[in-house]
Amino acid sequence: MQRMGFGEKWTGWISWCIFTATFSVLINGTPAGFFNSSRGLRQGDPLSPYLFVIGMEAFSRLILRAVRGGFLSGCRIKGRSGDGAVVSHLLFADDTLVFCEASQDQMAHLSWLLMWFEAISGLRISLDKSEILPVGRVENLEALALEVGCKVGRLPNSYLGIPLGANHKSMAVWDGVEERFRRRLALWRRNYISKGGRITLIRSTLSSMPIYLMSLLRMPRVVSLRWEKIQRDFLWGGGALERKPHLVNWDSVCSDIRKGGLGVRRLSTLNRALLCKWNWWFANEREALWRQLISRKFGEEEGGWYT
């Protein structure tokens, strides 16, 4: 970080976090005293995400300079008017996605870019865990992967423009979450959980598991009905999810506690609310990359985005 130009405030803070950690080694089952670390962070240290952001900021600058110099092309998002927008790379958590053409020259430039970043930052990029993902038909895929030294991967159909929710294959996206539903239920000893405990588990766990997917995709009605049936059977059916009389209508169960209900969230309503948040974010996050891409690709009506 000192080589990258960060001041004493940042480097001193990070050094303090590194040197405060202590370790011990077990010799024949007995701790042999403690010693301080001289580099690296403990697993789960809250400072780790910030270090990644700082390091990736330097990598982003290198990529942008390569795009401006014509060494990498990026991905051009065509719009209804104008030239659209160019996306050179995306960062999410600790993953990095770089866009370029399927050419030997651009793969070589990307390989040099990674090598320069390693020399500048002192970090080591694990190419064994990296993949080259083709979009469309690519003839010399193995040769391109060999140029960088990574593996050949394959994008799932949902990333290649195949509409979700259009046929039975797209249901696999939701079937995976349902499988997690059932695995989680199998871990609970439902015969020994009271109805109050089941309500708590439904509200805290079962209703929250599909939130990430529901915030991105519209849930088919058949899926929401199927998942709500699992919740109903868990609430009233006991240990085997068997069919038993439901003592209270499900609409009443999903009503607000102040109205006499049990406060269980209706999945279809929650899905619509999560998707409607994008309208609010579109109106407020005007500098965000995703907002600019949607605006340039689909255009805006007079006075703002027409939903």
Image (tube, grey):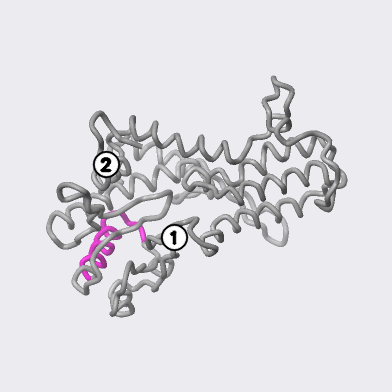
Q: Nearer the viewer, residue 208 or 252?
A: 252
- Residue 295, label in figure: 2
Q: Nearer the viewer, residue 200 or 51?
A: 200
Name the chief secondary structure element in magenta.
helix
Q: Quadrant of the C terminus?
A: top left
Indicate left or right for 10 with 84 as reference. right
Q: Position of residue 252 (x, y in %)?
A: 73, 30
Q: Residues within 10 Å of mark 2 (few under 14, many from 20)?
A: many
- Give the magenta-colored segment's residue range: 108-124
Indicate left or right for 146 with 233 as reference. left
Image height check: is 192 above or below 73? above
Q: Nearer the viewer, residue 85 or 43?
A: 85
- Residue occupying the point 30% across, 44% down: 294
- Residue 116, label in figure: none
Q: Is residue 64 magenta?
A: no
Indicate left or right for 244 with 161 as reference. right
Q: Position of residue 13 (x, y in %)?
A: 40, 36
In the picture of the structure, the residue carrying the numbered disc 1 is 158
Q: Residues within 10 Å of mark 1 (few under 14, many from 20)?
A: few
